[in-house]
Image: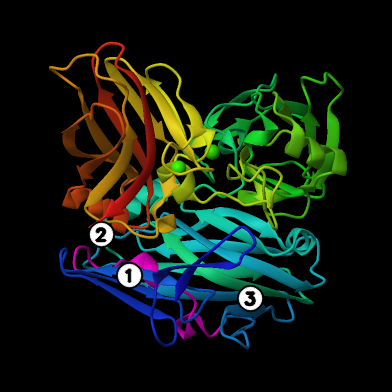
Amino acid sequence: MVQQVDADYQFTGVEYVRAMGDGLVTIRNPHLNATLTLDSRDHHNPTRIAEGDAAADPPSQIRFDESWLPAQPGSAAPNGDGSAFTITPNGAGNARIDREYQRTGTSWTPGSVSFSVAVTGTPTRSARLKVTLNAASTGAVQLGSTVVLADVLTAGETEVLFNVPADTLAALQQTQEPVTIAIEVAGAAGAAVDIKSLRATTYRATPRGQARVGTWDGLWATTASTSKSPVATVGETSQRVCSSGSRTLESDSFVPKSFTWISRHLAVDVRIPTGLPNPAWQGSVQLYYHDRPEDTVSQFAGQFDLTGYPAGEWVTAHFTLPEPIFEALQETDRGSTLQISLMADAANGDCFRFDNVRFMGELQWNGATSSGLGDGPFVPVTTAERVLGFETEDAWHVVQGTPASVVESPTNPETNALSLPVSNYTVIESTSFPTSELFTFGPTLKLDVVSPPPVNPGWSGDASMFLKCMGANMSHQEVATNTVPLPQGSGAHVVNFVVPPAGLALLAQDNECQLRLVLNGPTNAGTYVLDNLRFAF
Ligand SMILES: [Ca+2]
Ligand SMILES: [Ca+2]
């Protein structure tokens, strides 16, 4: 049974799904001739399989099971409750589990692999977790960045994300050859690694706890010789940093409150170049936080020593933030910057690379809380509430038109809605959201609209919704709904958009999507209030 709870986690009496038995829920939709299976019998590895309207999706089947065993070398075994694998390195500190996935007859290509990791014991400083992919046309390639086990021990259980390099992804999309995904532990004598909740997506993903400056789509400011590199662990580019000696990079200004999930542990991926002259000293990275509006000096956040990690490989540099910086991230709503100081020799024929600033460890919500609660209990807002419910300022932005604002919902007291002035062609767009966070979707997308008094009785205007998703081939695909008349006159109206089968197929995949709403009205048509987007059958 799935029941709604209130802010105090007490049941409200509202039920969403009921199923008798062991956690296997099957929802049949005769209208679509489709079946949705929610399998939570292993509550650490829940899966969702949509059948009928789309073929069973290989990523939903990527999970830990006996087929990953035995470990070579080292040992690995399911945990007592079957929720996780414990990997124990051999005497030399090494262990590896892997699994081959067939792709014949599917269009599936893995774009990223993620899971949760916890470490016990006392790993050496160089002990790390590495994920690789091997296919005939690509050879063995590193996914994402290695994670240092000692840092996981410090940060606590953490979600880790390993993106397939863009060139590897492009090469795999040309074939249907099998891929082998391997999880390796290196140099970790005396430690054990617990991994659980394995998941694969068809696109390169962004870790939770990452804000705009973290993806490195643009270069950080530096006086060193620098350029963009397509060798990246998140997004399309990383920053290549050459020269020698001490080099400082400074991020664009950002609002600390814009980090919606934070922790005390900040991480950045560093690719150590080949051709460094002295393997006994590969250099170090220092992190600073600069509260620009306060105009104080940069605050030192920590140092990560690069010696001891392989050249030509990404490694995750970890920093435990001092308390004043952690407090600033929760409070500062004005521009700040991060600075990275690289101290290292110049590499012969290669350069350092940086990418992927994000938070590690247990994340805490740093964004908006749901409205109407005043000083009441703290409640994070779900994706559905933010995007479909128009509950927070950050979920939608105006692409064309005058600014919108979040107001109290005219139909649901103590919740929010979006107030949008419309004049001629007005366009708003949502933030991107993972389809996995939608509880339900169907061919009708309903929207509550409160309309202003008519200004042109002969033509009320019209509205169209567009669904834009990241396709399996790293390209954006956009699907339009029907165009409906904008409602006129006082009171609340319901507008029904029809999502075509192509849109339903995009939603059924493990995907990242955005919604774009186009309102085409008379000049100075007035202010519309939008609320409560929901899918229906
Ligand atoms: Ca990047
Ligand atoms: Ca709402």
Q: Which amino acid does label 3 sit on?
A: Ala
**Which residue is the site of mark 3?**
95
| Residue 166 visible somewhere in the drawing | yes
Q: Residue at x 65, y 74 (%)?
A: 194
Provide the residue span drawn in magenta. Answer: 52-70
Q: In which quadrant is the N terminus drawn?
A: bottom left
Q: Residue at x 55, y 27 (%)?
A: 218
Mark 3 or mark 1, which is nearer to you? 1
Q: Is residue 182 left or right of residue 345?
A: left
Mark 2–mark 1 distance (CA, rounded to whole Å): 16 Å
Q: Is the magenta stretch mostly helix, strand or loop?
A: loop
Q: What element carries label 3?
A: strand
Q: Which one is nearer the viewer's eye here, 145 or 494?
A: 494
Q: Do the residues labelled 2 and 3 touch (CB within 8 Å)?
A: no
Q: Position of residue 137 (x, y in %)?
A: 35, 58
Q: What element carries label 2?
A: loop
Q: Which amino acid does label 1 sit on?
A: Ile
Mark 3–mark 1 distance (CA, rounded to whole Å): 32 Å
Q: Where is residue 419 in the image (x, y as percent from the top left)?
A: 43, 27
**Above or below, 90 relative to 108:** below
Q: Residue at x 45, y 36 (%)?
A: 417
